[in-house]
Amino acid sequence: MRRLIIVIIAIVALAAGCVRGGKAVDKPTLTQDEAVARIEQLIHDTANALTPMPRLDLYRPSLNVGSCLDPTDGGSEDRVVISRTYFLRDIPKDKITNVAKQVKAYWEQQGHLIQGVSETGTVISGRSRPDDFLLSVDHSDNDVLALGATSPCIWLNGTPEPSPHAS
């Protein structure tokens, strides 16, 4: 469980971006509700492509709103990232590696970018295309896979809050 929490924190940090530069862009983004809907779509579509089909068990607290640190698009750090994680329940222990491979194959079929795969093949990170949500699957110490997604940096309401100094 501790390893899973560390992975989730790392995912949020990676999703927030790792390249600083460019000028700030305060263009409209997805809203929080739109980002959550896309996260749910990515997770549920992936789970529905798996055999045996897992039961999704929401990790609590799962809807995390984190800081947008070092945004890769050069936009404002005042934005946030949204993330959610589910445990994939009812997968027999001897099927975990195969199910993780199915996740990777499904993401590749959808055109998503695979960024990393562990030696065991049960920890995978990627980015959705075309919208750049961070995707992850992780194998916990108690033989349960977790599937997560994190949005790119967004404004909660889709647009920046008006400046208090604006007239």
Image (cartoon, rainbow, N blue to C red):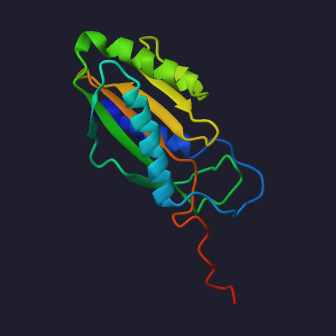
Q: How many marks are shown on the rendered structure?
A: 0
How far across and how far down the image is residue 110, in percent?
57, 28
Q: Is 3 situated left or right of 11 in this image?
A: left
Which residue, as the protein is rendered here, is positioned at the far bottom?
A: 167
Q: Is residue 17 visible?
A: yes
Residue 23: % across, % down: 77, 57
Residue 67's place in the image compared with 145, above or below, is below
Asked whether 7 or 93 is in front, the reply is 93
Residue 101: x and y in percent read 44, 15
Question: Does residue 140 lie above or below 38 as drawn?
Answer: above
Give the quarter of the image for residue 99.
top left
Asked whether the viewer can see residue 115, the reply is no
Q: Residue at x 37, y 12 (%)?
A: 98
Q: Quadrant of residue 132?
A: top right
Find residue 61 and report its horizontal and vertical position in percent: 29, 49
Quarter in which the C terminus is drawn: bottom right
Using residue 11 as the reference point, say whether residue 30 is left or right of it.
right
Quadrant position of the N terminus in the picture: top left
Figure check: 37 above or below 113: below
* Quadrant of the rendered image containing residue 79: bottom right
